């Protein structure tokens, strides 16, 4: 007898990966678009964030003061895939430029609240001004079948003023069904 019956353990059931994507911005911002932006959000690929020698960042510049949540999105990223209770994990590198109060006109905050959203649910995390936040992670449990993948500035007192800039790169998004 080899004794295999009692010595083999069973692991946890693996999650079903519905969609997994990686987005880099060396030469293009596609398929990302501006989302819910008043005025124009200029999106430029192949940029270097302050303090970085890498030119694989997307630079996003607002030309108008924002009055509601706004940012970037991929329309129908998980079209026909997402269901309630699916889990989205988004990891990215972010750098928010602190330029004369353009992220907090009252001068009180040293962070900006970004959120990732899918399935009518979102997860919000603070990003420090003038600091590169590597592998910044958002985890979202979907409440509906809404399929747009959105990364945006959320909190009212963090809304960007005209001329505000943020950089983003290495967006990794994975949607799983637990």
Image (cartoon, rainbow, N blue to C red):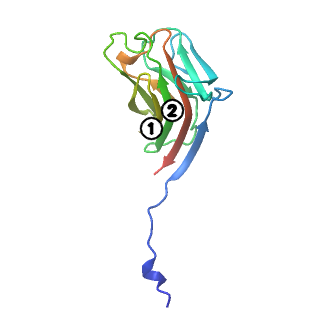
Image side of residue 58 versus residue 138, left or right: right
Q: Residue furthest left?
A: 108
Give the residue pinned by disc 1: 137
Depth order, front residue of 80/99: 99
Give the residue pinned by disc 2: 93
Mark nearest the camera among 2 and 1 is 2
In the image, residue 154 sits, relative to residue 87, either above or below, namely above
Helix, strand or loop at disc 2?
strand
Residue at 51 percent across and 34 percent down: it is: 92
Residue 149 in view: yes
Residue 122 horizontal/vertical position (percent)? 41, 33
Residue at 55 percent across and 43 percent down: it is: 81
Residue 151 horizontal/vertical position (percent)? 49, 28
Say whether disc 2 or disc 1 marks the residue closer to the N-terminus: 2
In the image, residue 61 sits, relative to residue 53, either above or below, namely above
Badge 1 density bin: few <14, some 14–19, many ≥20, Cα 10 Å: some
Helix, strand or loop at disc 1?
strand
């Amino acid at each position: 007898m080899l004794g295999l019956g009692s010595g083999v353990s069973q692991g946890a059931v693996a999650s079903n990966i519905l969609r997994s994507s990686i987005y880099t911005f060396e030469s293009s911002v596609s398929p990302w678009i501006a989302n819910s932006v008043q005025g124009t959000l200029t999106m430029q690929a192949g940029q270097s964030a302050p303090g970085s020698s890498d030119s694989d960042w997307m630079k996003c510049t607002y030309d108008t003061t924002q009055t509601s949540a706004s940012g970037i999105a991929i329309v129908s990223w998980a079209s026909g895939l997402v269901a309630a209770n699916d889990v989205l994990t988004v990891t990215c590198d972010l750098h928010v430029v602190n330029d004369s109060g353009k992220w907090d006109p009252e001068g009180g905050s040293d962070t900006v609240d970004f959120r990732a959203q899918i399935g009518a649910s979102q997860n919000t995390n603070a990003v420090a001004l003038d600091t590169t936040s590597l592998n910044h992670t958002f985890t979202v449990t979907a409440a509906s079948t809404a399929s747009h993948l959105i990364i945006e500035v959320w909190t009212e007192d963090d809304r960007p003023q005209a001329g505000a800039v943020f950089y983003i790169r290495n967006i990794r998004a994975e949607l799983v069904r637990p």
